[in-house]
Image (spheres, helix red, strand yellow):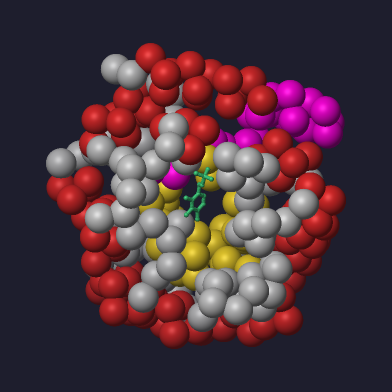
Amino acid sequence: MSESIVQNVIKIKENIEKAALKSGRNPMEITLIAASKTQSSEKIRAAIQAGITVCGENRVQELLPHVEVNSYEGAQVHFIGHLQTNKVRQIVGKVNMIQSVDSVRLLDEIEKQAKKINIVQDVLFEVNIGREDNKGGVMPENLQELISYLDKLENVRLRGLMCIPPALAEEDELRTFFAQTRQLFIDTKSKIGDNKHYIDCLSMGMSGDYMIAIEEGATMVRVGTAIFGQRPPLR
Ligand SMILES: *Cc1c(COP(=O)(O)O)cnc(C)c1O
């Protein structure tokens, strides 16, 4: 098992604790997700042995082979990448959560596929908090439409929100984006009266900014490079 992955996970958990305590939060309410895109089964297994309890995968064509060989055994797996409607069928029921839901079309398809296999699929709504073109996520002003649409569904359970702020944002801008997403999260929680849903997840922060995200309220951070080192290129 890879020594550096163990060391990295220990270090990140220490940092999570520091950031949580600094902002008066309980470190136990923050989940470290290993963003494992392009990593081998061996690396993923090493991360799980090092204490990772949730893996985050970006691409359906990587996720399925990993599921096939049990790479994620002992951990949950969340889908965190852009999701095409025609691939929903392949992952519903195979992932514990889909974090990147950003349209009514995706919701409809998740509902349909989850119904077929008689499960309730947990999801997050991804918010395009930096209002970037060519980026996934629902614009903040369209979030309410997705929330209202949940009334039509039976096999989808909303658990919260996810965001990926602009890559080049400075620290103060990042704080603003994270704080805005947290406010949307709080608003969402107060709007969902239905006890079918359970709004407890705010997924934000990556290798470069997870401590800032925690200070601004994240309950899940998605960390790749800081756990695994530099990523092998996409194939
Ligand atoms: C790759 C990825 C991450 C992790 O990025 P790092 O900078 O390597 O920590 C987090 N979230 C999503 C959606 C990603 O695609």
Residue shown at 47% from the left, 40% from the top? 224
Q: Position of residue 51 (x, y in %)?
A: 44, 24
Q: Position of residue 160 (x, y in %)?
A: 61, 59
Residue 20 is left or right of residue 7, and the answer is right
Q: Position of residue 178 (x, y in %)?
A: 75, 55
As drawn, which residue projects farthest toward the left? 69
Residue 27 visible to the viewer: yes
Q: Nearer the viewer, residue 172 or 13?
A: 172
* Count of numbered marks: 0
Residue 147, compared with residue 161, is above or below; it is below
Residue shown at 74% from the left, 71% from the top? 191
Residue shown at 24% from the left, 36% from the top? 41
Q: Nearer the viewer, residue 68 or 6?
A: 6
Q: Nearer the viewer, residue 186 or 58?
A: 58
Residue 232 is left or right of residue 117, and the answer is right
Residue 86, compared with residue 99, is above or below; it is below
Q: Position of residue 121 (x, y in %)?
A: 41, 62
Residue 188, compared with residue 62, is above or below; it is below
Residue 3, compared with residue 68, is above or below; it is above
Which region shows up in magenta? 16-36
Look at the image and tell me in which quarter the N terminus lies: top left
